[in-house]
Image (cartoon, rainbow, N blue to C red):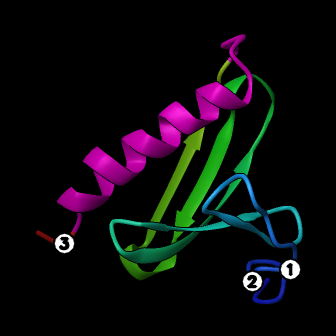
Amino acid sequence: MDESTRPQVRTESTPEQYGYQWWVTTVDGHPAYAAMGSGGQLIEVVPDLGLVAVVASTDAVGAAGAQVYLDLVSSYIAPTIGK
C-alpha cells in the first residue's frame, strides 16, 4: 500500500501525482490519496485524519464529478475533523 500511494508517474496537467492506481494529493495540508472512477465515483483517504470518504454516484459528468467531491472533502469535511 505504501508503494502504491507514492508518486510513480509525473503529471504535467494537474498538481496531483499518480501512484499505482491512486492519485497522490493533499487535503487541508495532510497527505492523501484518491481513486476516481466513472461517473464521479470516489474513494479518498486521509490517513492523518483517520478519514475515508466514499462516493457512489451515477452522475454522468465523469471525472469532473469526482473533482467536485474531492473539493467537498478538502474544503468542508477535512477542516472540521479534530477541531
Is 77 within the magenta? yes
Q: Are marks 2 and 1 in contact (CB under 8 Å)?
A: yes
Mark 2 lies on a secondary structure that is loop
**Residue 59 position in % (x across, y down):** 66, 13
Q: Which residue is mark 2?
A: 6
Q: Is residue 31 above or below residue 62?
A: below
Which quarter of the rendering shows the N terminus? Answer: bottom right
In the image, which disc is placed on residue 8? 1
In the image, which disc is placed on residue 82? 3
Q: Amino acid at mark 1?
A: Gln
Residue 71 sits in quarter: top left
**Residue 14 position in % (x across, y down):** 66, 55
Mark 3 lies on a secondary structure that is loop
Residue 12 sits in quarter: bottom right
Q: Is residue 43 above or below residue 32?
A: above
Which residue is pictured at 86% across the width and 79% down the height?
8
Which residue is pictured at 74% across the width and 78% down the height?
5
Which residues are drawn in magenta?
58-81
Q: Who is closer to the viewer here, 33 or 13?
A: 13
Is 1 within the magenta? no
